Image (cartoon, rainbow, N blue to C red):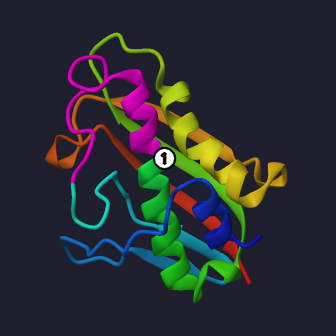
Amino acid sequence: MNILEKLASLGLELPNVPQPVGNYRPAKRSGNLVFTSGQTARINGVRRYVGKVGREVSDEDAYLSARDAALNCLACAAWAAGGTDKLRDVIKVLGFINCVDGYEKQPAVINGASDLIEKLFGPLAAHARSAVGVNALPSNVSVELEIIFEAD
């Protein structure tokens, strides 16, 4: 199965590439690497899972927020690479979690992205990763991700 078929089997689909709100690209390719700009769980223009994790956003919804942000990263990387069939591997995931003071479950939140990546690319797509708690993110989103992909 290709990535789009795997997404469909999970009840998901590739969203539209989010349009930048500033002077930048959604993703940029350099050689065989594709770097995504920070992406959130705004799917096709609809903002989801807004607020601080540990207060307005539950751990479960934060996990889904990371999953949806990964979907947007995938859409951006596919745009820059020329299609999902050009994406071969995931090199690094950098996740930021808008959370309350004292929150310590950042890695579990970013598992929402990592688990999706494994389902789409297989266990060999184990990647380097950071999960960082922050006191604020743009538009009060709960999670923002950057992902580096390898492409043909």
Say which residue appears at 47% left-offset and 67% top-offset: 36
Q: Quadrant of the N terminus?
A: bottom right
Q: Is 20 in the magenta?
A: no
Task: Please tell me in which quadrant of the rendered image residue 148 appears.
Answer: bottom right
- Front-lying residue, 15 or 73: 15
Residue with the most extreme left position: 139
- Per the image, label 1 sits on a secondary structure element best described as helix
- Badge 1, how many Cα within 10 Å: few under 14, some, many 20+? many
Identify residue for label 1: 67
As drawn, 124 above or below 112: below
Task: Please tell me in which quadrant of the rendered image residue 20 appears.
Answer: bottom left
Q: Is residue 95 left or right of residue 48?
A: right
Q: Is residue 70 left or right of residue 141?
A: right
- Front-lying residue, 21 or 44: 44
As drawn, 5 above or below 49: below
Say which residue appears at 63% left-offset and 53% top-offset: 92
Q: Position of residue 89 (x, y in %)?
A: 73, 65
| Dominant secondary structure, magenta | loop
As drawn, 146 above or below 59: below
- Front-lying residue, 32 or 120: 120
Q: Is residue 101 left or right of residue 129?
A: left
Task: Please tell me in which quadrant of the rendered image residue 140 appears.
Answer: top left
Say which residue appears at 54% left-offset and 58% top-offset: 147
Q: Position of residue 72 (x, y in %)?
A: 43, 63
Say which residue appears at 52% left-offset and 36% top-offset: 110
As drawn, 103 above or below 67: above
- Front-lying residue, 43 or 12: 12
Q: Position of residue 25 (x, y in %)?
A: 35, 78
- Which amino acid does the dot numbered 1 rest on? Arg
Q: Provide the residue span drawn in magenta.
A: 47-66
